[in-house]
Amino acid sequence: MSAVPDGKKLVRSPSGLRMVPENGAFSSPFSLDEPQWVPDKECARCMQCDAKFDFITRKHHCRRCGRCFCDKCCCKKVALPRMCFVDPVRQCGECSLISQKEVEFYDKQLKVLTAGTTFLVTAGSSDKPQTMMCCLSNNHRYLFLDGDSHFEVELSRISTMQVLTEGSSPGGGMSRATGLLLQHRPPGSQDVLQLRLDASDDKRAASTWLSAMHKAAKLLYESRDQ
């Protein structure tokens, strides 16, 4: 079982073990609200195969999308960390594939981001970069950059983010991530500030962290349509 993040506690619900905010802690920006279930009375047939529900063919709700399915079309049980379910819960085939990818993000990339690594950070129009440790906060809401000075960038206030790359193999292989350029608007300000992160001494660790950040940004972007 995964460790419980700061500001969360484990609660047993009818659907399984859940992580919920503790002491009014803000939820992670990666979290999704639970769907409103399709009412039983409005669902006489499976919304996937059109099988008619009866005493033998029972109906089940997908925990991710809230639609009604028969057991065959909603038999997958996968953890759903974005809705705080750490125990596997019943999902339809389409949703289970999405959730499986997100479980990998939570188990791998998110741990890389919160562990952090060192970058050369250039703020605004400054021409002198600082060596800073950059990591994602435990509640996943902020990027913390610590060095001779300190920056906190709230993910929800990032307007643009571009991963900088270099090189490619003759066979068309993937280029390596070497930096990050982002623009954000601090709380209470209308000004858009720019930060540039470039790989420091450990370029492999920086590339791994940047790749994880790219996946995080993609997840947040896709959440707008969910």
Image (cartoon, rainbow, N blue to C red):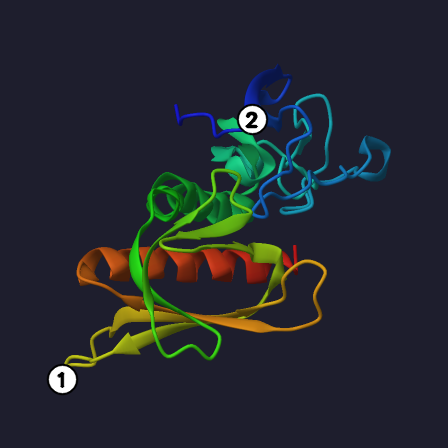
**In terms of image quadrants, where is residue 128?**
bottom left
Above or below: residue 116 compared with residue 76: below
Dividing the picture into quarters, in which one does residue 169 lie?
bottom left
Label 2 close to label 1 by CB (< 8 Å):
no
Q: Quadrant of the N terminus?
A: top left
Residue 107's place in the image compared with 58, above or below, is: below
Residue 33's spot in the image, x, y percent?
68, 41
Q: Amino acid at mark 1?
A: Pro
Residue 181 image offset from top left, x and y in percent: 43, 72
Q: Name the residue located 51 percent from the left edge and 36 percent from the top edge.
A: 81
Q: In this rendering, would 34 be left or right of 1?
A: right
What residue do we see at 56% from left, 47% from top? 141
Residue 86, numbered label: none
Quadrant position of the C terminus in the picture: bottom right
Between 120 and 138, the one lying in front of the other is 120
Q: Can you give x and y, in whole percent of width and height, for residue 209 in the image?
A: 32, 55
> Which of the marked residues, 2 or 1, is nearer the chain's N terminus?
2
User: Which residue occupies the foreground of this view, 57 or 69?
Assistant: 69
Q: Mark 1 sits on what residue?
A: 170
Q: Is residue 89 visible?
A: no
- Based on the displayed image, in which of its 4 quarters is residue 115 positioned? top left
Q: Marks 2 and 1, how far apart in space?
A: 47 Å
Whether residue 175 appears in this view of the structure is yes
Q: Nearer the viewer, mark 2 or mark 1?
A: 2
User: Residue furthest toward the front?
Assistant: 148
Residue positioned 49% across, 62% down in the render = 218
The residue shown at (61%, 26%) is 20
Q: Which residue is mark 2?
A: 8
Closer to the camera, 28 or 222?
A: 28
Q: Is residue 70 above or below residue 134?
A: above
Q: Amino acid at mark 2?
A: Lys
Figure label count: 2
